[in-house]
Amino acid sequence: MLKTSTNGTQATTAVKFALRPTAETLADLSRPIDPRHLKTRKQGNTTLTYCPWNTIAKHLHRRAPGWCWEVQWVQEVGGSVVVTGRLTIPTADGDLLHYSAVASEPLESASKAPAAEVAASSCLRRAAALAGLGLELWG
């Protein structure tokens, strides 16, 4: 259920979606992300092209209805935060597709966001790439 606010009142709306067959879901996830949804940033002397986590989530909503993201583990290791997460995608065939990933971020990074948030969003992007979404960005 999704809570929405209309004129200061709370209403409950059921969120409905149709699961799709496994092959169709995987084919759709493997389609490249439109370049207009990508961003760039400088990292040292390199310019990186990436897809923000919230855009990845929007693509997952469209391409893999019913998807679920779970942060499984957060740990500080040697001056970095390490996050392990799992992306689960249900299909109409009754399959649950699981994609696990790990990402880390130095505690003393240049990012303005907390290291755990940066690592978690990177972890989601990596798990989505394992499913085929945005895989073309990991060259």
Image (spheres, rainbow, N blue to C red):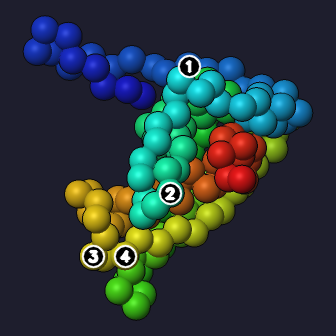
- The disc, 2 or 3, on the residue closer to the chain's N-terminal end is 2
SS at badge 4: strand
Residue placed farthest to the top in the image? 7
Marks 3 and 1 sit apart, C-alpha to C-alpha, by: 42 Å
Foreground disc of the pair 4, 1: 4
Dot placed on the residue nearer the N-terminal end, 1 or 2:
1
Q: Are marks 2 and 3 in contact (CB under 8 Å)?
A: no
CA–CA distance in space, label 4 to label 1: 39 Å
| Residue 101 showing in the rendered view | yes
> What residue lies at 63% left-to-right and 54% top-to-bottom?
127
Q: Residue at x 71, y 46 (%)?
A: 135
Q: Which image quarter is the N terminus in?
A: top left
Query: How far apart are labels 2 and 3 at the CA level?
Result: 20 Å
The residue that mark 3 highlights is 108
Label 1, on which residue?
Answer: 16
Q: CA distance from mark 4 to mark 3?
A: 5 Å
Q: Are marks 4 and 3 in contact (CB under 8 Å)?
A: yes
Cα separation between marks 1 and 2: 42 Å
* 8 to the left or right of 135: left
Look at mark 2 in the image and give the residue it sits on. 46
Mark 1 against mark 2, which lies toward the viewer?
Answer: 2
* Kind of residue at badge 1: Lys
Mark 1 surroundings: few (<14), some (14-19) or many (≥20) residues within 10 A: few
